[in-house]
Amino acid sequence: MACALVALNVFFWLAASGFALPGGGGILQTLLGGRLIRAEILWQAPDGSIQDTELYRGVIIAVGPTGITLREKDRTEVIAVASTATVRYGAQTASATVLRRGMRVLIAAPANQPADTIQVEGIGGG
């Protein structure tokens, strides 16, 4: 699990920088930056295994005991959240109990499993 979290953090760091390609950000920034709605990414973990991660971005419109309802740019999606999910808000780490309606989030979930990582990006917006 620690390797997956490290890999996910590196992924977000690289996506935010867009690999610093000339001409306004590059393909990573275009695909995984602020315009991302949702994505499925296959990547190789440090142990050599292939990992399948689903990403969702939107605004929380409801929080339930086992999941959240997210308003994406093009639809509404109910996303299951693991009871052990990690929520990052700036430099702080918390549990999913801090999630509230109106928070803008980026959610990472292993394919076909509940989300295990949620990055709070701010409040409101689309």
Image: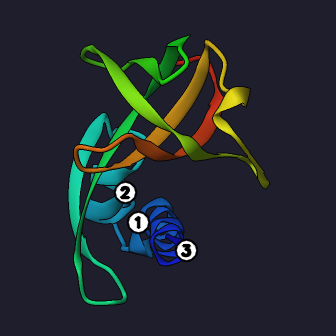
- 12 shown above or below 86: below
- Image marks 2 and 3: residues in contact by CB distance under 8 Å: no
Quadrant of the rendered image containing residue 23: bottom left
Task: Tell me which numbered mark, 2 or 3, is placed earlier along the sequence.
Answer: 3
Residue 97 placement, left or right of 24: right
The percent coordinates of residue 50 (x first, y second) are 20, 75
Which x, y percent locates residue 115?
A: 42, 42
Secondary structure at badge 1 equals: helix
Q: CA distance from mark 2 to mark 3?
A: 25 Å
Tell me whether circle 2 and circle 1 mark residues in contact (CB < 8 Å): yes
The disc, 2 or 1, on the residue closer to the chain's N-terminal end is 1
Badge 2, how many Cα within 10 Å: few under 14, some, many 20+? many
The residue under label 2 is: 29
Q: CA distance from mark 1 to mark 3?
A: 24 Å
Q: Amino acid at mark 3?
A: Ala
Q: Which mark is residue 62?
A: none
Q: Secondary structure at mark 2?
A: helix
Q: Which of pointers 1 and 3 lies earlier in the amino acid sequence?
A: 3
**Which residue is the site of mark 3?**
2
Q: Amino acid at mark 2?
A: Gln
Q: Residue furthest right?
A: 92
> Image point 49% across, 78% down: which residue?
3
Q: Which marked residue is nearer to the observer: mark 1 or mark 3?
A: 3
Q: Which of the labelled discs sits on residue 18, or is there none?
A: 1
